[in-house]
Image (spheres, rainbow, N blue to C red):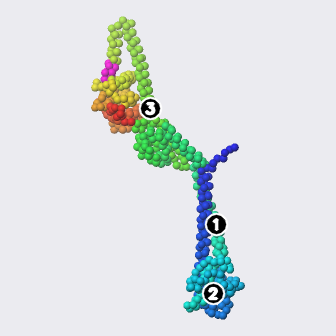
Amino acid sequence: MRVPRPRSLAGQLFAMQIVLVAAVVAGCALFSWFTAHGEAEDAAERQAMATAVAVAGSPSVRAAIREPDPTALLQPYAERVRRGSGVDFVTIMNPRGIRWTHPTPERIGETFLGHIDRALEGETFSETYTGTLGPSVRVVTPVYDGERIVGLVSAGITVESISARVQRQLGGLLAVAAGAVALGGLGTYVVNARLRRHTHGMNATELSRMHAYHEATLHAVREGLLMLDGARRIALINDGARELLGLGTDVVGRSVAELGLPAPLTGALLAAEPRVDEVHLTADRIVVVNTQPVASRGRRGTVVTLRDHTEIQALAGELDSVRGFTEALRSQAHEAANRLHTVVSLIELGRVAEAVGFATAELELAQALTDQVVAAVGEPVLAALLLGKAAQANERGVELVLTEDSQVDDGLLPESLAPRDLVTILGNLIDNAVDAAVGTGDRPRVTVAARAVDGSLVLRVRDTGPGVDTASTEEIFERGWSTKSASGHGLGLALVRQTVRRYGGSIALGRSDEGGAEFAVRLPLRTVSEVPA
């Protein structure tokens, strides 16, 4: 048996609103009916009051009372007044309450049914009393002949007549109430139809469950998720995006341009067209950005996903270095085989002395660079990096030189300075310098200086290349700058500056004495507890 699906949230609200509108209209109609009934009674009292006072003040009434047979004169007069004024009865009586007039002639001469004591004292008053015509709102007033009360006048309208008047108004009241219910129902239907479209016909339980899943998903996904509205303000952001972009908890509703992100990353987030797997740098991370515009009823927004590639990029850099070392070793092995063949050939030709001299010269040349690096740089990571880069540079026809004043003792670098970050900084600077020096002059050369000065590790890399315009210093450290192509896909210098800043250091660009570029990096030699998290 299929379990019936609960009514949608829009349907539930529609039913509740219809009931509420009907109840409000019914209450207003009931209130209006009671108000109209009360107003009708007040109007009947005023009408009766005016009629009774007018009759009591009429000279013809006083004159008729003096006659031997007042009824003969007063009964026609009272009936004319009753019909003309719209009241149900006009009764004129003597001070004892004996009727001289009555709408029913048979009742003439009988005692008036009602109170007359207050009227005999000279007061005009009203009351609701049940007489011969039934319950009525009546007014009793005295008739004066000089200072003496010679009669009484009572005029009134029956409660039945008053109810009939209210009932004649009730039709219009019901029509207005029905119109109000219909108009309220139509407005409620329009509003709830819009709500139904926005909630996709789901009920409250489904919406609550979806919201719970939505919140759990946002916090569980480690990738960054960012949703921008049509004005490029942040509509939604998860914990991963806050961490990757270094944002606080109060960014929802703020424009992307106000977040202080790097200009290339801000441009990617503000772009109207999709972006696919773009690499961007933040203050201390490398993120891969994907954006997808979304159109919803004419209002465009953007969904942005962010992936952290900081570790992957570092590993890729190390892998590139390993590949370079491998290529250098392959080249050195090939070169060593050529030299070994030369030595063997000299021996076979009987030129032993020349063979020994050739082999000794090659060994001294290779050993000299190794001894220089090992003597100056006791830190194994730096030493291995310099030897590997020297082999790579030599393979490309560039001489790598370590300055004589270079000195970095083993154990000098703190544990907080990760070896991979040191490879990122110095490796990228040397690679760029070698690229710039290749094919320039008779002796292309890259000079490296590494030493500890005033509690800081100072690294200097200069080349004999064409140099870099120092006016574009800030530009060259942006992602995408490169001297290799106009399109620009460079990431090395941007990674260097990011890593240097993470350790609280600085990097500067200048022109070397040899005409090329010179990069100077200064890294504080702090203890682990002093390094920024």
Res. 311 mark: 3
- Crowdedness of circle 1 by 10 Å Cα count: few (<14), some, many (20+)? some
Q: Residues within 10 Å of mark 2 (few under 14, many from 20)?
A: some
Q: For residue 174, which numbered disc appears in the image? A: 1
Residue 192 in the image: x percent, y percent?
A: 59, 54
**Residue 470 badge:** none
* Mark 3 vs mark 1, CA separation in Å: 76 Å
Whether 175 is among the magenta residues is: no
Amino acid type, label 3? Glu
What's the residue at 34%, 38% (across, down)? 471
Report how far apart the C-alphas of labels 2 and 3 lie in the structure: 117 Å
| Visible residue check, residue 402 | no
In whole angstroms, how far apart are the C-alphas of marks 2 and 1? 48 Å
| Residue 303 percent across, percent down from the top left | 51, 42
Name the element at disc 3: helix
Main SS class of the magenta portion in the image = helix
Task: Give the residue type at disc 2.
Answer: Arg
Boundaries of the magenta span: 368-377
Q: Which mark is residue 96?
A: 2
Q: Which mark sits nearer the N-terminus, 3 or 1?
A: 1
Q: Is residue 63 visible?
A: yes
Residue 378 in the image: x percent, y percent?
33, 23
Image vertical order of residue 343 relative to residue 201, above or below: above
